[in-house]
Amino acid sequence: MRQERAEQTRRALIAAAGAEFDLRGYAGTSLARISAAAGVTMGALTFHFPSKDNLADAVQAAGAATTRAALRRLDAQPVTALQSVIDLTHALAQLLAETVSVRAASRLSRERPGTSVPWRSAWLPALQDALARADAEHGPHAGLKDLETLVVYLVSGAEEVVRTGGHTAGVRDQLTRIWVVALSGTAAPAAPGTLIPAGSDAQPAGAPGPQVLQTDRAGAAGGA
């Protein structure tokens, strides 16, 4: 029973710290504020996390774990490697828009470089694996080599949009429009076929279907 209560306290502290770090950043967050938000004494907080750094490390670990779990579910989808790259950007944007621990982990990674495992390390290996599979499926292609850089920029941009008030649908719509432009130059090796810039996840009942980009071997592309 005592161990269970201790674990509940630890989870409450990590959740409260994530919300505070997400809102105020590392420098703007105090242990006293986290203690009050979690509803525990300062003594209980320091028992579990002797310093703010320890607590920030735990928040980053929680955000990374949530991210990896989401990408494992995504990896189970039967789509092409290039489609999985597109889907990964949508999944990360949705996590940033909807999950406090992920936003906190991303922000702390920028504000505490070199002090803990960066949030990017939770998703970059999955991206690199998808790009390696794309090379194997379609052959080496200059456009594919640059997709890793593109995705890093897209995810950073998605976080900025979320922080300035963007919501899930708006961020994903922006990603879709960017992918429509990008795929017109990078999808040629995958032809003939279809790629879905809006992501291949199921649409809500009654919602319009996702836009599909049709490609041919000449590299031409157009929205369906």
Image (cartoon, grey):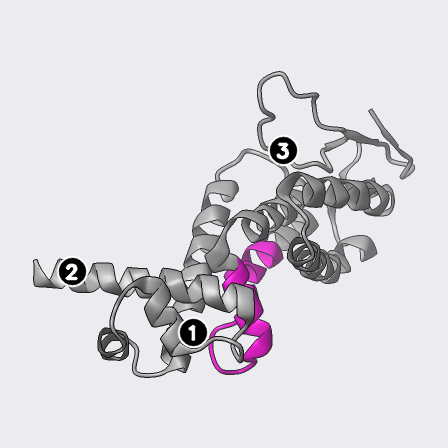
Task: Name the residue at 70% across, 21% down.
Answer: 208
Quadrant occupied by the N terminus:
bottom left
| Residue at the farthest top position | 206
* Residue, disc 3: 200
Number of numbered callouts drawn? 3
Whether residue 187 sits left or right of residue 64 in the image: it is: right
Residue range of the region highlighted in magenta in the rendering? 103-129
Q: Amino acid at mark 3?
A: Ser
Which mark is in front, 3 or 1? 1
At 41% from the left and 67% from the top, the residue drawn is: 17
Lower sequence index among marks 3 and 2: 2
Cβ atoms at labels 2 and 1 below 8 Å apart = no
Q: Which tag, 2 or 1, sits closer to the chain's start?
A: 2
In the rendered image, residue 16, in percent from the top left (x then y), is placed at 39, 63
Q: Which residue is mark 1?
A: 56
Q: Residues within 10 Å of mark 1 (few under 14, many from 20)?
A: many
Q: Amino acid at mark 2?
A: Arg
Query: In this rendering, would 181 be left or right of 32?
Result: right
Q: CA distance from mark 2 to mark 1?
A: 21 Å
Which three-letter amino acid code belongs to the residue tagged 1?
Answer: Ala
> Could you say whether the residue bearing mark 3 is in a helix, strand or loop?
loop
Q: Is residue 106 magenta?
A: yes
- In which quadrant of the rendered view does residue 171 lie? top right
What distance separates the C-alpha of mark 3 from that of mark 2?
A: 41 Å
Residue 142 at least partly seen: yes
Residue at label 2?
5
Evaluate whether residue 119 shows in this view: no
The quadrant in which the C terminus is found is top right
* 65, above or below 25, in the image: above
Q: Left of 52 or right of it: where is 152?
A: right
**3 or 1: tag closer to the N-terminus:** 1
Q: Main secondary structure of the magenta part?
A: helix
